[in-house]
Amino acid sequence: MFSLRKWARRAALGTLLATTALLGGCASAYLDGATKEIPAAQFKKPANPAPVQVLFDFQTKGVANAQATALLRDRVLAQVKSSGLFSEVGANAVPNGAVLSVTINNVPMSDDAFSKGFVTGLTFGLAGSQVSDGYICTATYRSSNDAAPLTKQARHAIHTTMGAAATPGNATKMPDHKEAAFQMTTQVVSNLLNDLSQDANFK
């Protein structure tokens, strides 16, 4: 059942990843359909792939979120490895100094998450509510220590509904919020890697 205390804690944390534990089966997660995964086969592969160090950071409103970073880091590393854009991919520095920094910043798409949850609680779920979390993903690549950076950015969103809220348009229902976060990350990172591969300065 809905718990106002749990909803308030979710709003205070400001991250979708916390809702898995806080809301349990009371909330439904939907992955926005505007951003699609781009298969690695469509990336423009460099003639001579070079090794790269990958740095990943997940943020909540611009502040580092260590728990979410730890949850998603290995998945992002594996995705970069399978992209075919680099000869070697790892978390440690490489001889040529190449670095790919990937940051996902979770930002609220509305400022009234608490009030929406409050209304849903008072009506015991009869009045539905929806909260949307936006994700701004930025990738910055330097091919060497003295090279000019290449920066790409993509956006995504996950919607959370409670009570009798209508199904969000152009969205796919996910088994839970954790899987929604996994799919969101895969899709948005694939767009960054594709944009990077198509850049004429990417070598």
Image (tube, helix red, strand yellow):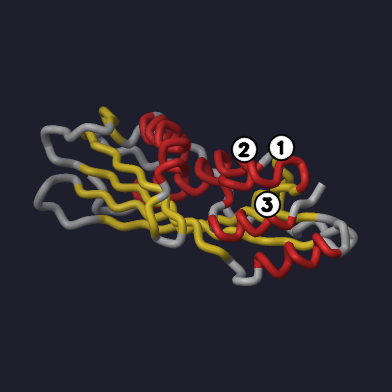
Image depth: mark 1 or mark 3 in front: 3
Say whether disc 3 or disc 2 marks the residue closer to the N-terminus: 3
- Residue plotted at (11% across, 33% down): 95
Amino acid at dot 3: Lys
Tell me the amino acid under the disc marked 2: Glu
Camera sees residue 80: yes
Marks 3 & 2, CB-CB < 8 Å contact: no
Please tell me how crowded label 2 is: few (under 14), some (14-19), or many (20+) other residues with Cα within 10 Å. some
Q: Is residue 112 above or below residue 1?
A: below
Q: Position of residue 149 (x, y in %)?
A: 22, 56
The quarter of the picture where the C terminus appears is top left
**Chain-order first, disc 1 or disc 3:** 3
134 lies left or right of 176: left
Distance between the alpha carbons at the discs numbered 1 and 3: 20 Å
Does 12 sit left or right of 93 as displayed?
A: right
Q: In this figure, which residue is indicated by the disc labeled 2?
A: 179
User: Is 134 left or right of 88, judged from the image as shown?
Assistant: right
Alpha-carbon neighbours of circle 1 within 10 Å: few (<14), some, or many (≥20)? few
Q: Secondary structure at mark 2?
A: helix
Of 202 and 128, the residue lying toward us: 128
- Residue in the picture at 65% in, 65% down: 113
Q: What is the three-letter code of the residue carrying label 1? A: Pro
**Mark toward the viewer: 3 or 2:** 3
Query: Mark 1–mark 2 contact, CB under 8 Å?
Result: yes
Q: Position of residue 70 (x, y in %)?
A: 42, 36
Residue beneath the point at 57% across and 53% down = 35
Provide the residue designation for mark 1. 175
Corner quadrant of residue 162? bottom right
Marks 1 and 2, how far apart at CA: 7 Å
- For label 1, the SS is loop
The residue singled out by tag 3 in the image is: 6
Residue 131 coordinates in the image, percent (x, y): 67, 61
